[in-house]
Image (cartoon, grey):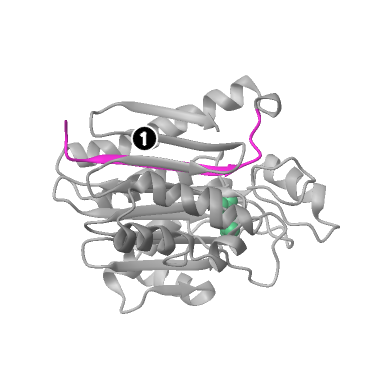
Amino acid sequence: MSLFSIAIHGGAGTILPQHMSADLQIAIETDLEIAVKAGHQILAQGGTAVDAVVAAVKVLEDSPHFNAGRGSVLTHQEMVEMDACIMSGENSEAGAVACVRHIKNPISLAYDVMKHSQHVLLMGDGAEEFAFEHGHIFTEQDYFFTDRRYDQLMAIKDSNLLALSEANYPDDDKHGTVGAVALDKYGNLAAATSTGGITNKKYGRVGDSPIIGAGTFAENGNVALSATGVGEYFLRKAVTADIAARMRYLNEDVHTACDAVILGELKNIGGEGGVIAVDRSGEVHFALNSTGMYRASIDRYGRLSVKIYA
Ligand code: ASP
């Protein structure tokens, strides 16, 4: 048994076999496997949990299949606006960005906010100015454009509907986003989340993903968590902070705490989605109340798992 493990997600939502082509399923599973292995390799070579979650999330941001970076959903104005967050459990350091429009890898920018700024959360033009000063790759909006996301927006643009990236368009209440959580050989936990948000969003809407304790949380000696689902519900329930608090104060194990919140508290107010977790011993847990969540892990025994459906 090794002392490290990693889990990733590529978004939760209404993901049903009958709506998935065989080609798309293979492409998604392949990218999940590449991403989880990228992070795991860093852990195996003695790298840190922080570096592992960044590496895994970057692979998912570069894929057109997930709602983050390249495959981000479109806003009402037919743009992408991305949010990302990273937290290190080692010393409760965190960095996040919101509403960035031209950054190829928002998770790397969040990392630089954590390491090279005095702040936790930067947004919009200010975040991009910081990115420029720190040498990040800028991309035109064209880079993020995919036909699939355009068609999804067109299906609901003229309505007031909002939709998660994995939805039965034009349904109004489904999901996407990517994230990673890891435990390294030194006992450090880390979590990272990156998203394009929800289709047809307006007014500078920001969800749970870049908010510490809502979409992303890590605490050494306890747990690392990354969420996906309709952010408004995860924000109101402070989902990842609540799971960590249950483990810290009630001594619940990672399975009990995640399920209590995702299948109980969150579901009870209508929140759909899920969370990935790695606890202090490297135990991995996936909790979801939706029909699917793109997910993968390599556990303490080195066992690879890649799954889509609930
Ligand atoms: N949680 C993300 C948000 O609300 C969306 C998602 O998970 O797909 O911005």
The magenta stretch is 1-16
Does 13 lie within the magenta span? yes
Q: As drawn, is 295 to the left or to the right of 170?
A: left
Q: Which residue appears farthest toward the right when viewing the image?
A: 158
Residue at (34%, 40%) from the top-left corner?
284
Question: Residue 109: x percent and y percent?
Answer: 39, 62
Q: Is residue 287 above or below residue 107?
A: above
Question: Residue 47: x percent and y percent?
Answer: 18, 46
Question: Residue 190: x percent and y percent?
Answer: 30, 54
How busy is the neighbourhood of tag 1: few (under 14 within 10 Å), some, or many (20 plus)? many
Q: Is residue 2 visible?
A: yes
Q: Can residue 102 be seen in this view?
A: no
Figure quadrant of the N terminus: top left
Number of marks: 1
Q: Mark 1 points at which residue?
A: 297
Residue at (22%, 45%) from the top-left corner?
281
The residue nearer to you, when weighing 138 against 292, is 292
Q: Is residue 48 above or below residue 90?
A: above
Q: Which residue appears farthest toward the bottom when viewing the image?
A: 118
Question: Residue 167: x percent and y percent?
Answer: 69, 43
Residue at (48%, 29%) from the top-left corner?
307
Figure quadrant of the C terminus: top right
Quarter of the rendered structure image containing ligand 1: bottom right
Res. 302 image quadrant = top left
Res. 59 image quadrant = top left
Q: What residue type is labelled 1?
A: Ser
Task: Label 1, secondary structure: give it.
Answer: strand
Does 103 lie within the magenta span? no
Q: Which residue appears farthest toward the front when viewing the image?
A: 250
Residue at (74%, 40%) from the top-left corner?
168
The answer to whether mark 1 is within 8 Å of ligand 1 is no
